[in-house]
Image (cartoon, rainbow, N blue to C red):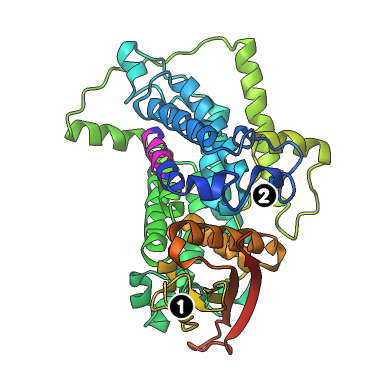
Amino acid sequence: MRIGIALIIIVDLLIRGSDLTAHYTDAGLWPTDLIHTFGWKTGNWSLHELSGSYAWVLFLFCLHFIFTLFLLVGYKTKWATLLVWLFTISLHNRNLFVQQSGDDLLRLVLFWGLFLPWNASYSLDSKKEAIPLKQNTIANIGYLLLIVSVYFFTVSLKTSPEWRSEGSAVYYALSLEQLRLPVGDLLYQFPTLMKIMTWFVFYIELAIPLLILWPSKKGNLRFIAFSLILLLHAGIGLTLYVGLFFIINIVTGIGLLPKTLLDKFENKLRIKKEALILSIKKPSPVKYFSNSICVSVIIICIIINLSAVRWFGYELRKEVWYPVNVLRLDQYWGMFSPSILKKDGWFVYHGMDSIGRQHDLYRDNDYVDYKKPEHIVKMYKSDRWRKLAENMQNDNYTFLRPLYCRYIIREWNKKHPNKKMNMLNLYYMEKQNLADYKTSELKKNLFCVCNDN
């Protein structure tokens, strides 16, 4: 799990790094002077906000990358885990509007990694000296409850008829052309199969927590739970454009695999591994302190999740939210909940030059084409851009639209000095997905008008 998480973070840093200017500098669409204006909570912090310069952000990305390499190979693993976790919090806080729930899961697993013995094997640390396999029972419970929470609460929050009675949730999910991939195109042709898949997804998510928590001597039930997680998220990743979300969910579930299975795997590949020393020592004050932190975090996380469901009437006090925000323990596992998003559409970039000539900045045409692209999902360079576009469609995030619009026209004029635009009208062509492969009448929404200043 440690190796898999490190590889995910490396890939994520490379993806984010390709848009470093756009998403993390003052020359981009979310400058540092706006960070505290929208979405920022008391207790949030970020090293990335100390400067909006490209050099500073690149320096932090490089440090983050180096510490992740240490985590990957297991060098000074505990310190590497701590630093990677802190840098991940800092990065996520820098731009909240390109984040998705997989990032929350990654951050929380890194937290539990501080207390898990994932340096005891497959690490440079264990090559130097035999590391005692000191299992922290409370941390193990915290990790297991995290994975349980993801699936238990996503099912609890799926209260709409699409999930509970109609069985139309997968149909509506695949109706979102801004998400649907080619395999999803294929599945979308079979309404009965999509209905079966809806029930399949719902009951898999219901079964996973039970399989994890049910006592099993050899860990066979947890192996089945991991297999279901693998099957579920492989299906999501093949049909919907969700970035690293599905891989994060699979990799963070690797800790569920029983040791007996891994031993068989190692024997087959003839992996030589140092014998692990099981040690039982009298708990020290440091151990008592770390256990207290683990217990507190478990209780807080359970309350945070319970407060998201309607039948639980308690919320954390304001004083408690400060450390929660400092450590970024906040979480919400309402994926496609309570119902499936039905608003869909695409952006049109209607530019005009100094003498009023029109230009399509997306297609680079001398006329503006409002027709639907063949594949809307291909309009997004990465899932970070797709998530930003999804947020801009939400009426609660209208402040993002002029920032995005101005960034687009600035970048266009920088790259096309001979085709400079004086003005950009950002349109969103909106449709509502309806039952039986129908859609509402197309709406032409003007999201923003901006100039090149």
- Report the front residue among 424 and 67: 424
**Quarter of the rendering occupied by the N terminus:** top left
One can see residue 338 in this view: no
Vertically, is 361 above or below 82?
below
Total label count? 2
Q: Position of residue 40 (x, y in %)?
A: 72, 45
- Does 9 lie within the magenta span? yes
Q: Quadrant of residue 252?
A: top left
Residues shaded magenta: 3-11
Name which residue lies at 70% across and 44% down: 33
The image's mark for residue 254 is none
Q: Which residue occupies the extreme front position in the image?
A: 355
The image's mark for residue 195 is 1
Q: Position of residue 151 (x, y in %)?
A: 54, 54
| Dot 2: element | helix
The image's mark for residue 305 is 2
Q: Quadrant of residue 128?
A: top left
Tell me which secondary structure the magenta stretch mostly adopts: helix
One can see residue 434 in this view: yes
Amino acid type, label 1? Lys
Q: Residues within 10 Å of mark 1 (few under 14, many from 20)?
A: some
